[in-house]
Amino acid sequence: MSDGTDLHDNNRFPFRGRQGLFVIKIGGNVIDSEESLQSFLKDFAAIDAKKILIHGGGKIATKIGEQLGIQSNYINGRRITDDATIDLVTMVYGGLVNKKIVARLQSVNCNAIGLTGADGNIIPATKRPIKDVDFGWVGDVESSMLNVASLRSLLEAAFVPVFAPLTHDQEGHILNTNADTVASTLAIALSVYYDVRLIYCFEKKGILENVDDENSVITLIDKQAYGQLLSERKLFAGIIPKIDNAFAAIDAGVREVLVGDAKDLIRNTTEKTSGTLFIN
């Protein structure tokens, strides 16, 4: 553990051999803060490398849903997406939030292009089957399903893709898909062609052993340590999908996965990083 100020000197970046790619996911609490979001987007635009941004919707969908009489329901940190809710998140995630982010990136000379998984058939998905819980219009994705050629064409043409967490079932339906999962899946699919560092940015310094102690950052984590933290119930529920996706990415060939403070984005694209680094 550390006080959150220690840096990993991992000496594995800058990229070696192949082109590098940063796949960066921005958390909802940063999106909810105008000041934090603007600062983050300025830093993101300054990254001089190929990059992809994935965002969620923060509390905006919930707020607008309440105004429209649509109640938000969650199980294990996942939104239940009924007919009314899929219309809501399509409108908010794919429209309002995505296009605001794209416009702001354009204002700082970042040639962003806003996308969902339906655009260019980049992220086909399957509707989650009903088991113990009916999640509704929620999509599950696998890296093998992705249309990587279309995405690579955008990257090689110097576009910066900005993805809303929406996929599609190839039968005309939009599916709500966890933004962490979208980021992990994109990173895995693209790791065949690029050296990928997947970065999850949110409002904390990293993954905390004690959610009430901002300085209890876990600087390195492997599966054994993760299992122990779960058994001791030290992790809050909202961070678990992020950790699961990080390990899935590492297992599937993504070179590095880091979870850290959005304020440290520039540092976390260099050889010296802060936050929580995932290792095999």
Image (cartoon, rainbow, N blue to C red):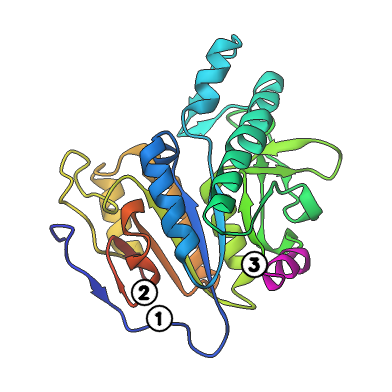
Give amino acid for label 1.
Phe
Secondary structure of the magenta portion, mostly? helix
Task: Name the quadrant of the N terminus.
Answer: bottom left
Q: Mark number for residue 57?
A: none
Residue assigned mark 3:
189
What is the number of callouts on the image?
A: 3
Q: Secondary structure at mark 3?
A: helix
Quadrant of the rendered structure where residue 151 is? Answer: bottom right
Q: Any magenta on residue 260?
A: no
Q: Is residue 175 above or below residue 266?
A: above
- The boundaries of the magenta stretch are 148-158
Question: Dot 2, crowdedness within 10 Å: few (<14), some or many (≥20)?
Answer: some
Q: Nearer the viewer, residue 28 or 218?
A: 28
Q: Secondary structure at mark 2?
A: loop
The residue positioned farthest toward the top in the image shown: 69
- Residues at circles 2 and 1 in contact by the CB criterion of under 8 Å: yes
Give amino acid for label 3.
Ala
Question: Dot 3, crowdedness within 10 Å: few (<14), some or many (≥20)?
Answer: many
Q: Any magenta on residue 154?
A: yes
Residue 59: x and y in percent read 46, 28
Residue 89: x and y in percent read 63, 30
